[in-house]
Amino acid sequence: MLSRETEQAVRADVFRWLDEQFVGRGGYEIHHTVLRSYTYQGERMPLLDPQRGIRNPATFSSTLTIRTVGSANPYDDAESDDGWVRYSYRQGDGGDNTKLVRAWANGDPVVYFRAVRQGYYFPFYPIVIAENDPVARVVRFPLEQSLQFLGDPATYTDAQRSYAETVVRARLHQPIFRARVLHAYASACTVCDLKHPELLDAAHIVPDAAGHGIPHVTNGLAMCKIHHAAYDRSLMGITPDGEVRIDRELLDEVDGPMLRHGLQDMHGRQIRMPESAKAKPDRERLAERFAVFAGR
């Protein structure tokens, strides 16, 4: 068994490694084979257990990572609208459950891997388990630690609930939305074909502030940051047929190569469409958003 100091050092290194593998590369999802390739000081230490939704290295005193296990999930695990995740004990007693409860008791930071699609995950870290219910056999934790200090979600004020919903959008919905949209568009800008994930966003067609601005791939477009900004500010529109239109005043402006090549040359171009018909942008939402552009 590792000493507590060494175990905490490994956890810190896992977070560093995830920063390097994920955040540093503009990533939006990680394949399970990459997560199982992690090593610490030359020793392989997989971050996922292929047979379980929980990873408890034999040399660890408490849980290192937990994950959602997809549609075959036999447990009642789910993220709620208040920004908290409910994670069930495994069947039986002892073993994995002992280490899970110990992570709660010790306040040990863990990683929560949220499934994006089969075999791919989005990591949330560091996560600290805030509640343990041995009767219901579940633990609960917030996706954002600040939520823990708001108290029981059932007693949230309107302001607290609004804050929690904002956190859920930023910490859960937006990353998962981005992952699914960038995958659908093969990690390339739908307007200019730029293929650098670190420079790409998932742009909402109908803004998420609108009631029907759902974080679904059909309400999204993969865009580089300049085209996302232009689209959000109605300096660029996209017709229901997928044709790019640039604001008339902007077309007439003279302001160097970035404006000319980045925006003006895109006028009249057809956007790149996803290969999957189920992922293609919704025509009605495109039409609604284009009407805003046309009415400026």
Image (tube, rainbow, N blue to C red):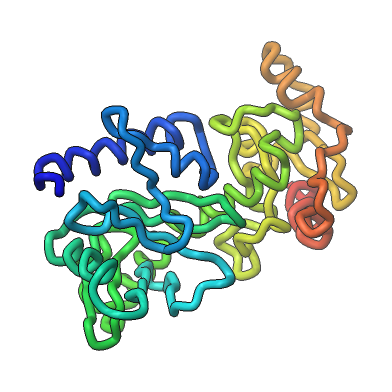
Residue at left 52%, top 37%? 27
Percent across and percent down for residue 71 are 58, 70
Q: Front-most of 65 and 261?
A: 65
Can you see residue 115?
Answer: yes
Residue at left 20%, top 61%? 103
Residue at left 9%, top 45%? 3
Residue at left 22%, top 64%? 99
Q: Residue 253 is drawn in which quadrant?
A: top right
Percent across and percent down for residue 280 are 80, 53
Can you see residue 291?
Answer: no
Position of residue 50 in the picture relative to residue 223 (left or right): left
- Give the answer, above or below, for where 101 lies relative to 179: below
Position of residue 258 in the picture relative to residue 87 (left or right): right
Q: Front-most of 25 and 229?
A: 25
Position of residue 30 in the picture relative to residue 165 (left or right): right
- Give the answer, above or below, for where 77 lies relative to 146: below
